[in-house]
Amino acid sequence: MKKVTIAKGDGIGPEIMEAVLKIIKKSNAPIDFEEIEIGEKVYLAGNTSGISDASWDVIRKNKVLLKAPITTPQGGGYKSLNVTMRKALGLFANIRPCVSLHPFVATNFPNLDVVIVRENEEDLYAGIEHQQTDEVVQCLKLISRPGCEKIIRYAFEYAQNYGRKKVTCFSKDNIMKQTDGLFHQVFKEIAMEYPNIEANHMIIDIGTAYLADHPEKFDVIVTSNLYGDIISDVAAQIAGSVGLAGSVNIGSECSMFEAIHGSAPDIAEQNIANPSGLLQAAIAMLYHLGFTTEATRIQNAWLKTLEDGIHTADVYNDALSKQLVGTSEFADAVIANFDKVPNILKAVTPPKNSVIQLPEYKRKEASQKDLLGVDLFVHWSGLDANVLAEKLKALTTESMDLVMISNRGVKVWPNGFSETFCTDHWRCRFQSNQPLEKIVIVTLLGKAIDLGIDVIKTENLYQFNGVKAYSMGQGQ
């Protein structure tokens, strides 16, 4: 018997959870449920994270969480529990299957069947932000090789085990050559290990446009955190309804399964909510636990129920629906269809291996790392880069020269354009043709202090195995 943690959440959460638990229990899946309380009541009791230490202990003990939607109170000081859980539990992969249920759920794309595999821990969602000057704030985009390898390998393993034929990588490496460039490079490396699966890459903007217009051309899409967040909702919406989609969050130790819709307090306790999104998450949970027979049985019964025209109010329509049912009655209809398969919708077949385990990450041998210079980020309220350059030239040494000043990534010195609008945030590059010792940078900063130059941040410029590993800036 496998013990699973459940959280009934807020709004419609308790009633859709009860419907889903009824279905799982009737399937005879060998699961025992242990309930915790998270969400609005915990927030309002004074816990700004929305979860108690005791609940954390239960989740970490059982390793698997099935979570209904929660409500985060309005106002400042309340942390996003979803983001906290994903990071704290190391849930590196977010999987969103999006499939058309045409003609029973309205969609313009009857052949849509795509899975979004989204990196879940890093990228801009690391949430590292700073105000650096009066006019400029920054958010750090962090992409790591281990993070790339885990999510990309998971996407290929998923495709292989679930009979998918193609994996597409979305990135923006034509602009962000270091961060998105690393993601794309790792994708190319790992794709070579799966010669039976087609691999291709698209720039995120045109890729998203193509997904919204020709979703049937995609099979599995793997991408980084922010892009994945956006395109997951695009794919779910064009499939027919965000409310029917489940979300899977996988880590090396723990996993979390949830609906992607909100808690909808306006329709709570009315027995009209559709439990399908949470049910899809629960089915994915059963596959993850290795209960393939039960998962397949429930999924086919759910499809047969939709095909029979037994619908909740959110998808009911006079042309195709035959019976309007409530939350609990929909669950009963799914149970009544156990061991049946749909005739029009595509029946589900069990995956080759639903339990995906990745090899332990192995750190590569350290590169030869050489320091070539430093970018000084300077808070200066002037407007003429030539004036700033004259001030900065006093910092030059025999080891390093001032070679460039940029503003918001655009080179403004030397040979800048007067038309370029500048803020009070300047990147000032000092560089050498030979490897440097770090003491040179310390000396440089000391001179800047003596001259009253407000250095707000530094970034060392390195080359790894002889390859420069920093952006050059637009206009260079």
Image (spheres, helix red, strand yellow):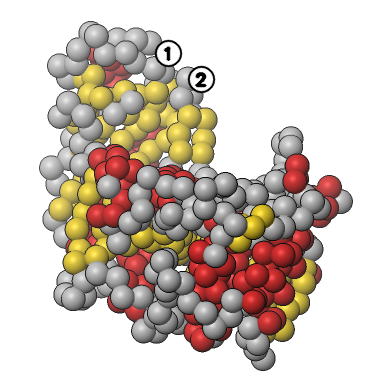
Q: Position of residue 48 (x, y in %)?
A: 76, 49
Dot 2: element = loop
Q: Position of residue 63 (x, y in %)?
A: 62, 77
Q: Is residue 20 visible?
A: no
Q: Which quadrant holds the N terminus? A: bottom right
Q: Which quadrant holds the C terminus? A: top left
Left or right relative to 45: residue 318: left
Circle on res. 189? none
The image quadrant of residue 199 is bottom left
The image quadrant of residue 429 is top left
Q: Nearer the viewer, residue 467 or 300?
A: 300
Identity, as a three-letter code, of the amino acid under mark 1: Ser
First in sequence: mark 2 vs mark 1:
2
Residue at (60% x, 67% y) in the render: 279
Residue at (43% x, 54% y) in the render: 103
Left or right relative to 243: residue 11: right
Q: Nearer the viewer, residue 328 or 322?
A: 322
Q: Position of residue 428 (x, y in %)?
A: 29, 28
Q: Position of residue 226 (x, y in %)?
A: 43, 47
In this rendering, is residue 454 above or below 147?
Answer: above
In this rendering, is residue 64 above or below 431?
Answer: below
Left or right relative to 378: residue 178: left
Q: Is the Cβ of the residue at disc 2 closer than 8 Å to that at disc 1?
A: yes
Mark 2 or mark 1, whichever is nearer to me: 2
In this rendering, is residue 408 above or below 304?
Answer: above
Q: Which residue is identified by label 2?
A: 134
Circle on res. 381? 1
Residue at (43% x, 71% y) in the render: 343
Q: CA distance from mark 2 to mark 1?
A: 9 Å
